[in-house]
Image (tube, grey):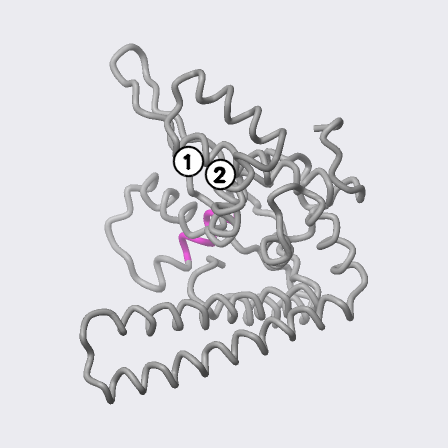
Amino acid sequence: MESTGVYWEPLANHLHQAQQRVSVVNPLRIHGFAKSELARNKTDREDAARIARFCQLHAPYPWQPLPAERRKLRDLTRHLHAVRKARHQHRNRREGTPPEWLLQSLKRTIAHFDEEIELIWKEIQAHIDRHPELKRQRELLETIPAFGELTATLLLAELPNIERFASARQVAAFAGVTPKHRHSGSSVRGRTQMSKMGQARIRCALYMPAIVARTRNPIARAFADRLAERGKCKMVIIGAIMRKLLHMAYGVLKSGKPFDPQYV
């Protein structure tokens, strides 16, 4: 099945519990497969047949559900993000000169969001404390310079089991922080960009730490200086630091040891 919308995961969990083999595929792969077949029509029946042909040809890996404690952590952090986003939207509505009744209503709503954010964060903390492995992994992530408690928690919530990845490069590809090149012969010399074909929430969690790491993380600082000397622009450097930080996160989680700059 394709990983689209909010319905695929409950269905995948149900089929997995029923001892059925389930594969979950990025919809971009199915879309590319349809283009390769020169598909002219799009109906539910044809889409189902196309997905079946894709599975016969490519034999995608079987899907494994997240452990219950990881799934709850992910749901909590995503809910936290949604409430914080709603608070930000209501704060923006105070700009200009809203009528007094609206301003008071916004203040009450924002205060409610503040209380809810505090409650959700406390539940996240308590949930991690109840599960020693989650707590241990978050403490490992916090040893990386520029990673605070929130960043470590968000990464822990969005990354699947680290044993799923054979290398740090695979983790970077999963998050979509790998470079995308556009070179062909002598005529095409496109600018290298971040691929962004991966988990966007991980990229969001890494953006501010990458800016902080530019000055606080000695490995990232030296790496960024080398890129700047080669004429790379600011955003390319930030993207490269995001990838470097994710490599560090993979290293501490895979080894089970705190960050050590001597082994990077």
CB within 8 Å, label 2 to label 1: yes
Which residue is at the far bottom?
101
In the rendered structure, the answer to whether residue 83 lies left or right of residue 35 reads right
Residue lying at 19% horizontally and 70% vertically, measured from the top left: 96
As helix, strand or loop, the secondary structure at mark 1 comes to: strand
Mark 1 burial class by Cα count in 10 Å: few <14, some 14-19, many 20+: some
Task: Relative to 3, say whether 210 is above or below.
Answer: above
| Disc assigned to residue 42 | none
Is 246 or 118 nearer to us in this picture? 118
Give the left or right position of residue 66, taking residue 206 as reference. right
What residue would you read off at disc 1?
194
Give 15 or 4, whichever is nearer the viewer: 4
To which quarter of the image does residue 82 belong?
bottom left
Badge 2: how crowded within 10 Å, few (<14), some, or many (20+)? many
The segment highlighted magenta reads 49-56
Q: Is residue 237 above or below residue 186?
A: below
Left or right for 35, reference 98: right
Tag shown at residue 177: 2
Image-based side of 38 in relation to 88, left or right: left
Residue drawn at (78%, 66%), measured in percent from left and top?
131
Query: Residue 137's x, y, as percent?
Result: 74, 53
What's the residue type where badge 1 is placed? Met
- Say whether residue 53 is magenta: yes
What residue is shown at x 30% (from left), y 62% (from top)?
43
